[in-house]
Image (cartoon, rainbow, N blue to C red):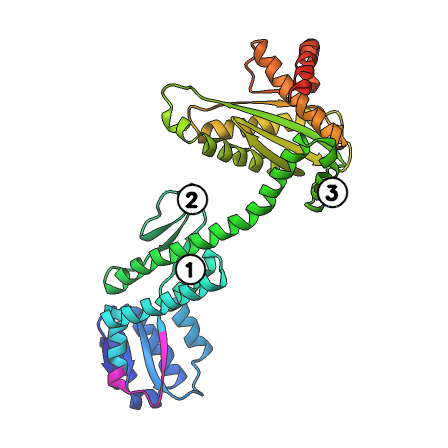
Amino acid sequence: MAFIEHLSEVEGVPAESLVVLSRHGSAAITDYQLDVALRWIAIRQAAGLAVVTDELWRPSVTALEIARREAIALLRALAGTDLAQLMQTLANEIHGDASLALERADAAMAAIMSADAHGLEPSRVAELMAGALGTEIFYLADAGAERPPGRTAAVIVAGQVQGWLTSEAADGVLGVAVGLVLHVAAAAAARYLEAAARSREIPIRSRSELLSGLLMADSGRSEDLVTAARSAGLPVDGWHVAVHMQLAWPEIGQPEIDMTSFEVVDSAARVALQRFASAGGTWAFTRFARTVLLVSMTGSDPGPLAGGRIAKVAGLAVAAIEDRFPGVKAGAGIGAAHEGLLGLRASVTEARAILASARAAGRTEPVVTFDGAGIHRMLVEWYTTLFRSAP
């Protein structure tokens, strides 16, 4: 910190200092003198210049350009400012006063509570924190990223890191305050993401239950379920292609998988659904035991090549599941395209049958299609008969 009476004294200020110009010196300042002073400040590698003036004063365009180019802070204090208090405040800002850090942390906590109450997304929480703390805060929405450098807090939802709140705040009391507040903000961000996931979960679960009902209900309940499916946005009257995915893992040596088999199947279903949904169209899924059933629903006939297109995505889904759960093996059978409720059930039956017959015949490819059954058609049709007659 350097206090000077006249701009001519700026030539001798210490490096990296913040220069404060007295009231007398500020009153006598001209645009030309300010330009020269800023150039000297740049030469001396000082941090900035604070002048005391009235509200009408505006630095020249040249002065602003010099300050911007040389990264010089140009501050204006109103004429009635207590210079002693100003110097103390600036010193606190520069050196990190504990009371100031607590005040900023308190303001940041208030901002977080407001964001939490209004359901603001994590990036917005980071913006509010940055404004309260006076330092940059970033939200990195990358679940797969490693912990970034600097002060960070993980945003964890359902045991999985979904992103990071991070700051490059310097060490000292302000840095400690930032680190503490980051963890509170990360908890608020996690609650927002969890609530958003629940809101997305409702229609997904509704579709899953409807699909299960449509496949298992007797004729007396089918019409009611079809009406409910239409209301949920499922084109049940359209064309359907079923994907029957079977999961398997060793019974011995994988106790952690056996103990959480429901979670594995549920998570695998979501991994698969994400892959299929990214390819476009309307998809519904359900799961039972170690099986995941997904159905593509379209308003018009998808054509004879639909099975092949879906098989490519199914291959990606199988790979994604096996990558997510080492030790789990996945396979998928794909039925042909059929229309209406009866067509839905027919495609599901074909998908189950083609996978079962392929495994019985010793075929090891991860994805098989009913349309490509070829010489195995008779065996597939036999399995189809079995599945159709099964309760």
State whether residue 288 is above or below residue 110: above
Cα gap from disc 1 to disc 2, whole angstroms = 21 Å
The residue that disc 2 covers is: 158
The residue that disc 3 covers is: 227
Residue span colored magenta: 74-85
How far across and down, in percent of the image, does residue 224 sit?
73, 40
What is the number of the mark on residue 126? Answer: 1
Q: Residue at x 68, y 21 (%)?
A: 350
State whether residue 358 is above or below residue 154: above
Secondary structure beneath disc 2?
A: loop
> Any magenta on residue 152?
no
Cα gap from disc 3 to disc 1, whole angstroms = 45 Å
The numbered mark, 2 or 3, whose residue comes first in the sequence reads: 2
Type of amino acid at the residue the image marks with label 2: Ala
Foreground mark, 1 or 2, reads 2
State whether residue 45 is above or below residue 240: below
Type of amino acid at the residue the image marks with label 1: Ala
User: Does 318 sit left or right of 333 as displayed?
Assistant: left
Q: Between 107 and 386, which is closer to the camera in this rendering? A: 386
Q: Residue at x 35, y 66 (%)?
A: 133
